[in-house]
Amino acid sequence: MRRYIDCREFPSEMKCTVAIVADSEEELVNAAVQHAVAVHGEHDTPEFRSEIKKAIHEGSPHA
């Protein structure tokens, strides 16, 4: 089952509209953390990865 994280669900000053989709949770979390670190200045910590996992949805993002 495809899974996704939609950055629009996280309020930010930059109003990011990126959605990340992957088949595995591990791949999705890694990609989302890379995006959050590079674009939003977050830090890759176990606690942050746990928060990212809570934002995972099944299926594909809505247009």
Image: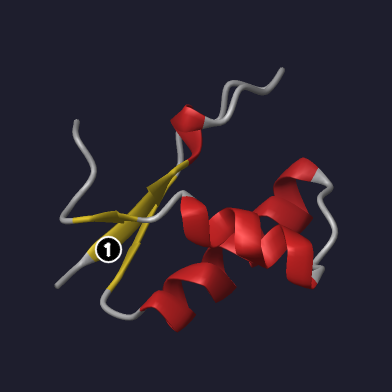
Callout 1: helix, strand or loop?
Answer: strand
**Residue 11 drawn at (x, y percent):** 61, 22
- Quarter occupied by the N terminus: bottom left
Q: Is residue 26 above or below residue 13?
A: below
Residue name at image x 68 percent, y 52 percent: 36
Residue visible at 73% across and 59% down? 48
Residue 23 image position (x, y, % from top left) = 26, 77
Residue 30, quarter of picture? bottom right
Q: Is residue 31 above or below residue 10?
A: below
* Quarter placement of the C terminus: top left
Pick whichever, 14 or 50, lies toward us.
50
On the rendered structure, is 42 left or right of 27?
Answer: right
Vertical arrangement, residue 15 with respect to residue 42, above or below: above
Amino acid type at circle 1 is Arg
* Mark 1, residue position: 3
Residue 59 lies left or right of residue 12; in this view the side is left
What is the x, y in percent for residue 29? 52, 70
Asked where in the image residue 56 lies, by quadrant, the reply is bottom left
Q: Residue at x 46, y 29 (%)?
A: 8
Left or right relative to 16: residue 18: left
Q: Is residue 3 above or below residue 55?
A: below
**Image location (x, y in percent) of residue 12:** 67, 23
**Residue at 80% across, 67% down:** 44
Question: Few, some or many C-alpha atoms within 10 Å of disc 1 (few <14, some 14-19, many ≥20)?
Answer: some
Q: Is residue 55 left or right of residue 21?
A: right
